[in-house]
Image (tube, helix red, strand yellow):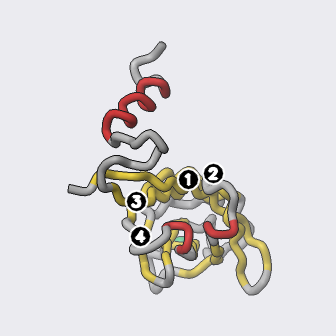
């Protein structure tokens, strides 16, 4: 069994947050959300005249900018794997996410390539979800997004 085996991870998590017999935390905890923008997939719209777009993602929660990935040069599909951590005020599942795919331009303003919404409240699983991106009603590709809700200790 490897050093970073999932079994070891599980048992160490148990030690960090003591639980009551009914499974509720015995100490004060709060919920955080880890949102990983995993990848940009098969973008069919180009806002660059020469070559491919230079994609990056702007992520919004309830209309507020939560994060921005680093731009990748000349790609219609790419792995980003950038994680953002937020502390929701209320129920984490009530946050409405919006993802704007942007094309970085060296000259002039960056272009919006497409946009997609993700509503955790209407999803059974938050893990490795496909967010469809649209531009003027047309599908132009997708993002893969992975969301984890975690209990952390409050002191
Ligand atoms: Ca560009």
**Residue appearing at x 71%, y 73% in the figure:** 45
Which of disc 2 and disc 1 is earlier in sequence?
Answer: 1
Identify the residue at the far top of this view.
1
Q: For this rendering, which residue is in front, 55 or 126?
A: 126
Checking the image for residue 128, the label placed there is 2
Which of disc 1 and disc 3 is earlier in sequence?
Answer: 3
Q: Label 1 belongs to which residue?
A: 38
The residue mark sitting in front, 1 or 2, is: 2
* 1 is higher (above) or lower (below) than 122: above
x, y percentage for residue 2?
45, 16
Dot 2: element: loop
Q: Label 3 belongs to which residue?
A: 32
User: In the visual, does 10 lie left or right of 144?
Assistant: left
User: In the visual, does 44 lie left or right of 10?
Assistant: right
Checking the image for residue 84, the label placed there is none
User: How far is the residue under mark 3 from the one under mark 1?
Assistant: 19 Å
Checking the image for residue 88, the label placed there is 4
* 109 is higher (above) or lower (below) than 95: below
Which of disc 4 and disc 2 is earlier in sequence?
Answer: 4
User: How far is the residue under mark 3 from the one under mark 2?
Assistant: 18 Å
User: How far is the residue under mark 2 from the one under mark 4?
Assistant: 20 Å
Which of disc 2 and disc 3 is earlier in sequence?
Answer: 3
* Mark 1 CB lies closer than 8 A to ligand 1: no
């Amino acid at each position: 069994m490897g050093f970073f085996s999932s079994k070891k991870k599980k048992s160490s998590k148990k030690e960090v947050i003591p639980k009551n017999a009914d499974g509720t935390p015995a100490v004060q905890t709060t919920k955080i959300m880890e949102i990983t923008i995993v990848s940009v997939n098969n973008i069919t719209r180009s806002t660059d005249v020469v070559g491919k777009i230079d994609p990056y993602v702007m992520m919004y929660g309830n209309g507020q900018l939560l994060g921005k990935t680093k731009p990748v040069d000349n790609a219609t599909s790419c792995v980003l794997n950038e994680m953002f951590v937020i502390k929701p005020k209320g129920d984490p599942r009530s946050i409405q996410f919006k993802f704007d795919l942007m094309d970085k331009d060296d000259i002039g303003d960056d272009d919006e390539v497409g946009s997609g919404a993700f509503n955790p409240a209407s999803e059974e699983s938050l893990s490795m979800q496909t967010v469809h991106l649209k531009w003027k009603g047309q599908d132009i590709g997708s993002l893969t997004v992975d969301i984890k809700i975690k209990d952390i200790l409050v002191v």
